[in-house]
Image: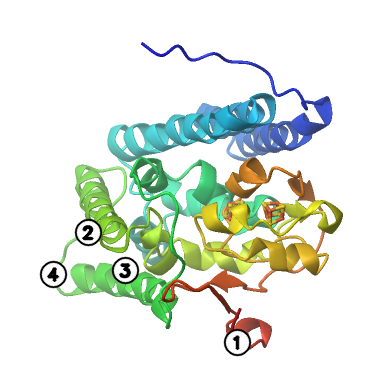
Amino acid sequence: MKRIRFAIDRRFTWKRMIVPGVTAVTFWALAVVLYGVSGGQIFALVNFGYLGTALGIGLGLYALLPRRQKPLGRRVSLLLIGLYLFFFIGVISQENIQVEGVWWSLINGTFYAAVWHYFVAKIVGPLLFGRLWCGWACWSVMVFDLLPYKQPSGRLPGKWGWLRYGHIVLSAVVVVVLWRVFGVQVGTNSATAVVWFLIGNIFYYVVGIGLAVGLKDNRAFCKYLCPVAVPLKLTSRFSLLKIGTDDSQCNDCHACVKMCPMDIQIPDYVHAGQRVLSTECTLCQTCVTVCAHDALKLSYGFDMGGRELLRLRTNGETAVYQPNISGGTQHAQ
Ligand code: SF4
Ligand code: SF4
């Protein structure tokens, strides 16, 4: 049997613990504030403290482990957070924290866990941590990343990315129609919430795995259909945390592009002297791991994202896709 040996990255410096440390401390600070605001509700303290600790452990392992073992940090974080949210919050605490639960809470004026979850993880959190949620905490990605299609062939050309906007609108329409026409309540803190939560998740897993197999791309669901990406893309463009680049180190090997699960043309940002400004970036750090020249690393800073440079799926060639959002054009490379 093959023995797994754990060692510390020879290039490790304590500076690399800044991102894990800041992330964990921010969540604990939030936990303490919410504990106070909620009049001493222990759940607020434990919940956000746990999430910050799990993220800190995952990001810390990533910083600490040698290059080949770094992905383990993300796996640990996805498992610790994904399983906790799915089983403890979703099933045991009977909270539907999927997007349908948010719509239900909003139309009822009941700000239950779903609203708090979206507010923290998908609207305000991304101002600081970008789409860290997608890469390190999502319980759908926790499963999709176990599939074998880790090296994508690029995005489908066309407007498939707009499906997720349709999905989020449709989810609101379904909740309202079920409630007003059929008297079905999505509910929260109830058995109905659990049933709804499980049905929603089964749908995500079945469709997500089907798309992954059909398109040979683990993250096909995230790219074309996930409604959660809609709010995340809005606020993550302002994110302080992004992938920083160093043009002087890059030799244009394109190893990062080949392995980026979100098809981002990373060297184009590198050569423009910009951080990775794509709102598709999930901060998974796969590009950082595979870059043998240390041209990439997580960094804090302030810049406006939204410049989408994506690799299109073409007949063996690559192409840059720049949607109108940045006023760019589409051209082949
Ligand atoms: S650019 Fe890097 S961190 Fe962002 S999604 Fe691609 S591989 Fe992950
Ligand atoms: S892997 Fe590193 S060196 Fe290669 S193209 Fe990407 S940023 Fe440049």
Q: Which residue is mark 3?
A: 171
Three-letter code for the amino acid on which mark 1 is drawn: Asn
Disc 4 marks which amino acid? Phe
CA gap between label 2 and label 3 equals 14 Å
Give the side of residue 239 with respect to residue 216, left or right: right
Image spot of residue 108 (x, y percent): 37, 62
Q: Earlier in the sequence, mark 2 or mark 3?
A: 3
- Label 4 vs label 1: CA separation? 41 Å
Which residue does the numbered mark 2 point to in the structure image?
Answer: 185
Among the two numbered marks 1 and 2 on one chain, the one whose residue lies closer to the N terminus: 2
* Residue found at x 22% / y 54%: 206
Q: Nearer the viewer, mark 4 or mark 1?
A: 1
Q: Are marks 4 and 3 in contact (CB under 8 Å)?
A: no
* Residue 271 vs residue 174, the one in the foreground: 271
Q: Earlier in the sequence, mark 4 or mark 3?
A: 3
Viewer-side label of 2, 3: 3
